[in-house]
Structure formats: C-alpha cells, structure tokens
Image: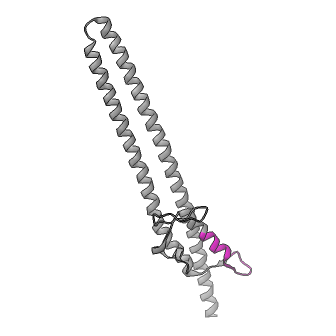
Amino acid sequence: MTPDAVPGAARRMHEDDEPTDDGTVDILYLIDKLEMLVGEGKRVPFSGRVMVEEGEFLDLVEQLRFAVPNEIKQAQRVIRERERIIAEAQEDAAKIIETARKRAEYMVSEQGILNEARQKSEEILRMADEKRKRALGEVDVYAMQQFNHVEEALREGLEIIDNAVRETVELLNRAKNAIGQ
C-alpha cells in the first residue's frame, strides 16, 4: 500500500504531482487513480470486466469520502468571500449616500443649488448601485463556476465508484458461483 493510498496520509496532488500542504486529496486526482486502477486491473476473459485489488479500491473510495467535504469547504469559502464583498459594497454605498446627503444639505441655500445637489446625489446613488450590482454579479458568476466544478467532480467520482462497485459485486458473485460448482 502506498502512502498516498492511506487516508491519514492523504495529500492533494496537482498535475505536476506536487502535493499541497493542506492535507487533503483532490477529487479529480482520486478519480484518475481509480481509472488507473481499473486500467491496470486484470481483464476477465470473454467479458468486459476487470478485476482490481480490493484493498486499493477501498482505499481510494475512503479517500474520496475525505475529499468531498474539503470541496464543500472550498465552496463555503467562496460563499463567505461573496458575502464579504457584498457587505463592503453595501458599506461603500452607505458612505456614498451619507456623503451625498450631507453635501445636499449644505447646498440647500437656494432652489437651483438644491436641484443640482439632488441631481448629483441621485447620480452618485445610481453609480453606487451599479457598482454594487456589478460586484454581486461577478461574485455570483465565480461562485456558480466553483459550484459547477464541485458538482461535476462529485458526479464523475460517484459514477466511477458506482460502476466499480457494481463490477466488483458481479465478479464476486461469479467467483462464488464458480466455487460452488
């Protein structure tokens, strides 16, 4: 058993096979390992079946169980970042509104100045609202991209696991039947 097959020694691997220091395993890396395990497995004659080492397979499944919560944590970090950006945008908008109000009150001495102040404050408010909406849109797009990546990785991993488990159970049943004859 290799060190990266042990859940406690799980390390995130990148395309250049360099581990990260966060102690997690990348889901896509584990899916690649499952594919390699199936690719290296022994073919069953006259069938599309492959036999794999049960221990290695179960180790990879266990690592996937540990990796999925980490992907969810990453998504939660994205959500927190989105909320922080929204709060900053709202604070900026509130400051701009307050500045506009103070300036407008100061300039209220004549009707013409008052009208000009209203127009300028409305323009400032409109610009602040547009800035806030742009920031929210950019954060939402980024968050949705990250959620889509996590969802896709989970689907692919679960499909591979499901197929591998189904094939393993079928092989075990055939082996039991062959021994019983």
Name the colouring of the figure.
one colour
Q: Residue at x 44, y 53 (%)?
A: 75
Q: Residue at x 37, y 14 (%)?
A: 119
Q: Residue at x 48, y 39 (%)?
A: 138
Most extreme residue toward the right, as rendered? 46
Q: Residue at x 70, y 74 (%)?
A: 48
State whether residue 159 appears in this view: no
Q: Nearer the viewer, residue 15 or 160?
A: 15
The boundaries of the magenta stretch are: 33-48
Residue 18 image-quadrant placement: bottom right
The C terminus sits in image quarter:
bottom right
Residue 166 image-quadrant placement: bottom right
Locate residue 65, reporting x and y percent. Answer: 47, 68
Locate residue 147, reporting x and y percent. Answer: 49, 51
Vertical order, 4 against 155 (above or below): below
Q: Nearer the viewer, residue 174 or 150?
A: 150
Locate residue 21, reporting x and y percent. Answer: 47, 64
The N terminus sits in image quarter:
bottom right
Vertical order, 56 against 158 (above or below): below
Vertical order, 105 against 7 (above or below): above
State whether residue 157 appears in this view: yes
Q: Nearer the viewer, residue 167 or 27?
A: 27
Whether 44 is among the magenta residues is yes
Locate residue 125, reporting x and y percent. Answer: 37, 24
Q: Is residue 141 left or right of residue 121?
A: right
Vertical order, 54 against 127 (above or below): below
Whether 68 is among the magenta residues is no
Number of numbered discs visible in the structure rendering: 0
